[in-house]
Amino acid sequence: DAGVIQSPRHEVTEMGQEVTLRCKPISGHDYLFWYRQTMMRGLELLIYFNNNVPIDDSGMPEDRFSAKMPNASFSTLKIQPSEPRDSAVYFCASSHSGEPYNEQFFGPGTRLTVL
Amino acid sequence: DAKTTQPTSMDCAEGRAANLPCNHSTISGNEYVYWYRQIHSQGPQYIIHGLKNNETNEMASLIITEDRKSSTLILPHATLRDTAVYYCIVRFPNSGYALNFGKGTSLLVTP
């Protein structure tokens, strides 16, 4: 298995532009998580899905952020409009509810820089 | 989830055992102790987990005290590639529980 795949790996954009981050979870996993990592706040959960349905989006910073999971093999995190304070590394992770201890597998992350 | 306390940083000589402590005094009876690590510029990686018995796998050993209020992750023969931030996380082992990463311990393995 290729593991969790994220694209792009790096994104540089200007303030006000729309940014879309993409994630392909491990095949067969039914949970998908989006995390954000900054120096100030560390790793924090933004939102997670179960069977493509958003379960908890309380970590989403504000309305500029939105996430979708149209099918079991694809999810997007969109920021519109982007701001410099959104600069961070965004990680996608997936897990399988059938595993008793629910290890989460993380992708390599997308490093976003908003100028 | 119970909160955890870890030292900010630690050093270890290559080839020696690295012992990373974690305090979780408010852990509840059904919560597990998980360890993840994050090597620079990579996503976090699962290492090991346990409930109350000591656990060992190919990566590390986990020692949990009898009262479960603290634990120690042991890397028996640390290598330079083990330099990373190590996170101790206490949570219920059910699907949908997100990982609550704290600050972790930054381990530096030196030649």
Image (cartoon, rainbow, N blue to C red):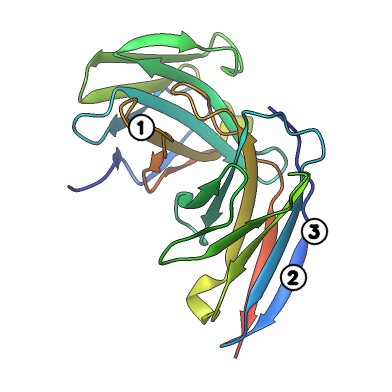
In the rendered view of the protein, which quadrant contains the N terminus of chain B?
top right
> Does residue A16 sit above or below A113 in this rendering?
above
Residue A46, placed above or below residue B14: above
Rendered location of residue A62, percent (x, y):
60, 12
Pointers 2 and 3 within a single chain: yes
- State if disc 3 and disc 2 touch (CB < 8 Å): yes
Pointer 2 chain: B
Task: Relative to B59, say whether B16 is above or below.
Answer: below
Q: Which residue is mark 1?
A: A95
- Res. B73 image quadrant: bottom right
Mark 2–mark 1 Cα distance, whole angstroms, equals: 30 Å
Q: Amino acid at mark 3?
A: Pro
Q: Which residue is mark 3?
A: B7
Between B61 and B15, which is closer to the camera in this rendering?
Answer: B61
Report the number of numbered marks. Answer: 3
Q: Which residue is mark 2?
A: B10
Question: Can I make out residue B7 in this image?
Answer: yes
Q: Position of residue B57 (x, y in %)?
A: 43, 62
How many neighbours does mark 3 have within 10 angstroms: few (below 14), some (14-19), or many (20 or more)? some
Q: Chain of mark 3?
A: B
- For label 2, count other residues whose C-alpha is less than 10 Å away and answer few (under 14), some (14-19) or many (20+): some
Three-letter code, disc 1 = Ser
- Asked which secondary structure carries label 2, the reply is strand
Give x and y (percent) for residue A52. 30, 13
Q: Secondary structure at mark 1?
A: strand
